[in-house]
Image (cartoon, grey):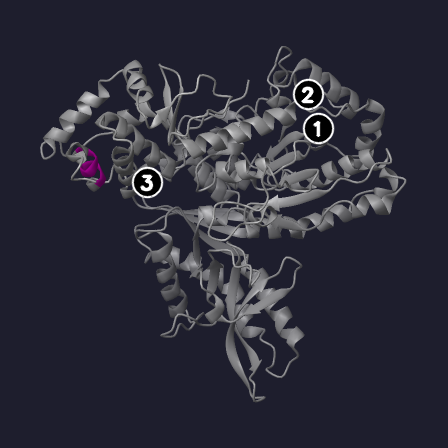
Amino acid sequence: MIEQHPFIQPLITLQHLGRIRSLDLALARYIADEINETDLEVLLAIALTSERNGHGDVCLDLLAQLRTLEVSNPAEYSELAEWIFAVKSLTAEEWWQKLSQSKAISSPSDKSEATPQTTPLVLSGSTTLPKLYLRRYWNYELAVKAAVEQRLDIHDHLTDSSIKPLLETLFATSQQSPDWQKIACALAARRSFAIITGGPGTGKTTTVVRVLALLQALVIEKGNPSLHIALAAPTGKAAARLNASIAAQIESLPFEQLSLYPDLLKNSIPTEVTTLHRLLGPIPNSRQFRHHAQHPLPLDCVVVDEASMVDIEMLASLVVALKPSARLILLGDKDQLASVEAGAVLGDLCQQAWKGGYSGETASWLKNVTQDRLPDKMVEHDSTRQLDQSITMLRFSHRFSAEGGIGALAHLVNQGEYQGQAVSDPLITLKLIFAQQPEQLQIYQVNHSSDASFAHLVVKGYRGYLHRLAQERPDPSSPSQDFDEWAQSILKAHTAFQLLSAVREGPWGVNALNNWITQILSQANLIQPMRSLWYEGRPVLVTQNDYNLRLMNGDIGITLKRPVMHAKGEVEEALRVVFMTPEGGVRWVMPSRLQAIETVYAMTVHKSQGSEFIHTALVLPDHSNPVLTQELIYTAITRSRDAFSLIYSKDSVLRQALTTRVKRLSGLTFN
């Protein structure tokens, strides 16, 4: 308790100043109480570890974090400022000694081995670069690393004669050289762990369907039972999107040429996609799942789509629940925003994906089975990094041209290049790209949401679905199917435009934007909000999974009026919220049954992941914010299919976003 430990007062002051959270202070106080930790510097390190975990870091780089620790008003907090100055003067070796002597912290000699201690924190790294973990995140990282390394050691000793003709059949019409999709298929079949990464439109879904066809054909032709495969995604929205596209991809495969048993092969490729939570079986009111090491999933292969959104805890839960022999294939865009939870696992694993890093042996094998030669710059003949031999980055976008428009904009933000050349000022180049494509790209510098250009953009963007709502409404006596088809057309029209925001709070945050847009659309007579929260045309976003209603976090619904028959046989128009089902139908839900929803004229960029809209508009805040990064802008741009708009207030804020990359610290490294 605070009365027992008055020396903890500097941490309380840091919490009041907003440098650590109440949760971080509570952890430090708990350690002081339970373990009788009396070293204030150790308690500071523990609080900072918790604080960085809240910002997505798996562990704490102590020295780097201390460099940012300052007091805004040293005169008012002179004692605290003097203490922080003294803390910053400690060397890495002195910190290592302090931390390693604490009863709250253990320091394993070998990071690859789990330690028998049950201390709440773990000290890793080195005496020159100490890293501090909360123990459960240390365990998550160990589990992921062990699972990946174990699967990298499992080779499928494929003969060229078995895989080569299948690849030729699957990619008979290929015009790419090298064909990265074909290379991805070959590498995914070679070992029990594989990553397929790439930007939007590069064919990740197309590729993984061919991977599954290849894997199943290889076992079926040997007379073995087909593999038990599961397709999963981190969110319901991402699962539904993959579910909608995978069936069409399967229909395009040449099963008659791939196998003597074409029907068996076709039926062996799964078409249903589930969320990772559902796959593992969540236990109510617990962080645990029904499937774990002692009760593994009865699967031979798991494919995880949108893997950039999977945090370290979820991936650790998955790999622990897999049989040692089960394959794991991760699919996603390494450059998108990472999960809101701790960890950026796909980014950690794909650090060298752009440059390849393939060994001479891998390059030679790929040449034999695919007839494609890897670019010389991507081959390191003496490379021993096994992870690189299982990663493929798809590099050709079928959706965007790299030379102009959205593709050029995304490449500039992601790589800092335009037309193959590095740029000195990304802000100037960004404005140049917008100027070159005024029909596809629009940029607005505004001071407030009341700006006429902002209002015009909003009205133009949302007019389509609202006009369809009003003008194509079936007659009240029409059959139910007519209302279903009307609702489907409205949901489809709603994907024509989506406003995105970088933040939730503030004048340019989601909450304020949704209020302002409601007023703008009301003044334009496109909606008629009533005193109650619900009105026709209101779009809503589901913010929590609801398995009873079969609605997932991220699902978008539209509020519509439709005839409803009451118990006495009376028919009246009532508000219902309509959602698209994974099968392409619609589901009508009473508004009163929706407990976790919010209006979604504007949504955060994080919430938009896994979605695609014809036209996306990104609004940036009018002041600097840590969330403003290249990854955030890249993710917003690549939600667009045909057009992108950028709304911002200050050049300095936009420049910050264009020159700042997400840095999430972890110890997930591979030799």
Q: Which residue is mark 1?
A: 183
- Can residue 419 be seen here? The reply is no
Residue 528 horizontal/vertical position (percent): 42, 73
On screen, residue 406 above or below 450? above
Mark 3, secondary structure of its residue:
loop
**73 and 634: which is toward the camera:** 73
Q: Tag 3: residue type?
A: Asn
* C-alpha gap between disc 2 and disc 3: 41 Å
The structure residue drawn at horizontal position 72% and vertical position 47%, both measured from the top left corner, is 270
**558 and 468: which is toward the camera:** 558
Q: Which residue is mark 3?
A: 625
**Magenta-span inclusion, residue 397:** no
Near mark 3 (Cα within 10 A), the count class, few <14, some 14-19 or many ≥20, is some
The structure residue drawn at horizontal position 18% and vertical position 33%, both measured from the top left corner, is 10
The reply, left or right, for residue 495 in relation to residue 181 is left
* C-alpha gap between disc 1 and disc 2: 9 Å
Please state the extent of the stretch shown in magenta in the rendering: 10-15
* C-alpha gap between disc 3 and disc 1: 40 Å
Q: Are marks 1 and 2 in contact (CB under 8 Å)?
A: yes
Q: Which residue is mark 2?
A: 374
Residue 14 horizontal/vertical position (percent): 21, 36
